[in-house]
Image: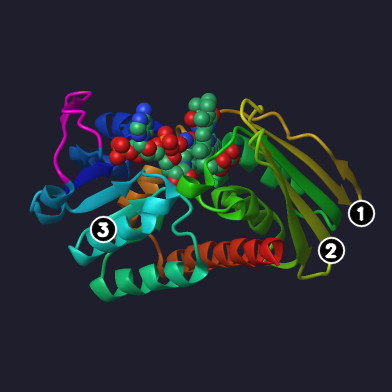
Amino acid sequence: MFGVVVVGIGIAGSVRIRDLLSPLQSTPSESLKLQSFVSRRDLGQYNGVKQISLEEALKSNEIDAAFICTENQNHEPSIRRFLEAGKHVLVEYPVALSAQTAHELWQLAEQKGKVLHVEHIELLTGEFNQLKKEVDGKELVEGVLHFTGGALDEQRFGFQSFSGIARITWLVDLFGNLTVTSASKEENEEEKYSKLTAHFTTADNRPLTWIEERAPGMKREKKIKFTFKCGVLDTLPPAPRAALGPPFMQDQNLFAQKLLGQVPEEELAAEKMRILHCIELAERIKKCCQQ
Ligand SMILES: NC(=O)C1=CN([C@@H]2O[C@H](COP(=O)(O)OP(=O)(O)OC[C@H]3O[C@@H](n4cnc5c(N)ncnc54)[C@H](OP(=O)(O)O)[C@@H]3O)[C@@H](O)[C@H]2O)C=CC1
Ligand SMILES: C=CC1=C(C)/C(=C/c2[nH]c(/C=C3N=C(/C=C4\NC(=O)C(C)=C4C=C)C(C)=C\3CCC(=O)O)c(CCC(=O)O)c2C)NC1=O
């Protein structure tokens, strides 16, 4: 059994608590035991789970792993403290707000012999599985991924290419490693509107564009237009419910498998490479926008 503490009780943190309290039968999640949670607010208890302080969590012998579910700005300091204290870490994406920090955090995890798992539910949805099947084996000519969503505070969630890293991860998982060719950002501070446009090329020199538009009340939605040699894909295929349970639950199972030593080295290495590559692209985009 691995004792778990959930840190940060927002949307993600409360889903984590729910899922930890009701693991699917005969799945690796059954080896996780939720002990307590940490919050900067005084919540006392949540769904029957008790609140403890950060210091107590770091010192506690009954806690083997932390789920870091706070805003992106807080990920780095929290991950460092739990790894330093000898705990395994699951962190909601993005792992950090710079490539350098991400590399450092991995080094620290390896030095401490602990698992650092970055949640990636964007790859675990029925929607994405279906899209991946449709794209598989087709030769890309060009493509666009356009995301819209509600406003996110940059002070808390970081530059848009980091908070939107799930879109980069989609493109990399579908089309392989990418190169950023240019990027720009439009903003209207009064209306809290922002639009990021990034251009990439694939290893075969095919162009891809990512647009990330955010404003208060804007509907959370993804649109695609992928042109292949054999035709155009311009709607996301209808998504069957993921067979393996909701995305956060699947991600939690993967973390538990890592703790149990059930994930092959090659898979761990490939995942780390993908995460670091995506963070590097996010950083490159940020630099282009700030030039
Ligand atoms: N929401 C989602 O579906 C997904 C989120 N993520 C990632 O999860 C992380 C957290 O995102 P999300 O949960 O959406 O963000 P939230 O804004 O809901 O929560 C972020 C933090 O804000 C604090 N907080 C939450 N509600 C309140 C409140 N009413 N008043 C004051 N403080 C509050 C909590 O910390 P505290 O308890 O310490 O006060 C919480 O950890 C991010 O890294 C995000 O990228 C990733 C994939 C999906
Ligand atoms: C309803 C309001 C709602 C909010 C405020 C919300 C926030 C939210 N969803 C996210 C991702 C995500 N959120 C979800 C799914 C959900 N997340 C949920 O809160 C719910 C209810 C679902 C699904 C039914 C998924 C799958 C991702 C990964 C990125 C993606 O594929 O969109 C992220 C991480 C950053 C990002 O990729 O944009 C945030 C902050 N999601 C929402 O749907």
Q: Which residue is mark 3?
A: 88
Q: Amino acid at mark 3?
A: His
Quadrant of the snapshot with the C terminus: bottom right
Sequence order check, earlier mark of 3 and 2:
3
- The span shown in magenta is 41-53
* Residue sitting at x 16%, y 28%: 44
Q: Look at discs 3 and 1 and give the one toward the viewer.
A: 3
Task: Report helix, strand or loop for mark 2.
Answer: loop
* Residue sitting at x 76%, y 70%: 203
User: For the residues marked 3 and 1, what is the alpha-carbon distance in whole angstroms?
Assistant: 45 Å
User: Is residue 257 or residue 60 the one in the foreground?
Assistant: 60
User: For the residues marked 3 and 2, what is the alpha-carbon distance in whole angstroms?
Assistant: 39 Å
Instruction: Measuring from the top left, give residue 95's x and y in whole percent.
Output: 44, 57
Sequence order check, earlier mark of 2 and 1:
2
Instruction: Measuring from the top left, give residue 45's x and y in whole percent.
Output: 17, 27
Q: Which residue is mark 2?
A: 206
Task: Report helix, strand or loop for mark 3.
Answer: strand
* Residue sitting at x 49%, y 59%: 97
Q: Label 3 CB, ligand 1: below 8 Å?
A: no
Label 3 close to label 1 by CB (< 8 Å): no
Q: Which residue is mark 1?
A: 229
Q: Amino acid at mark 2?
A: Arg
Could you tell me if residue 124 is visible in this image?
A: no
User: For the residues marked 2 and 1, what is the alpha-carbon distance in whole angstroms?
Assistant: 12 Å
Q: Is residue 18 above or below residue 156?
A: above
Does 246 sit left or right of 142 as displayed?
Answer: left
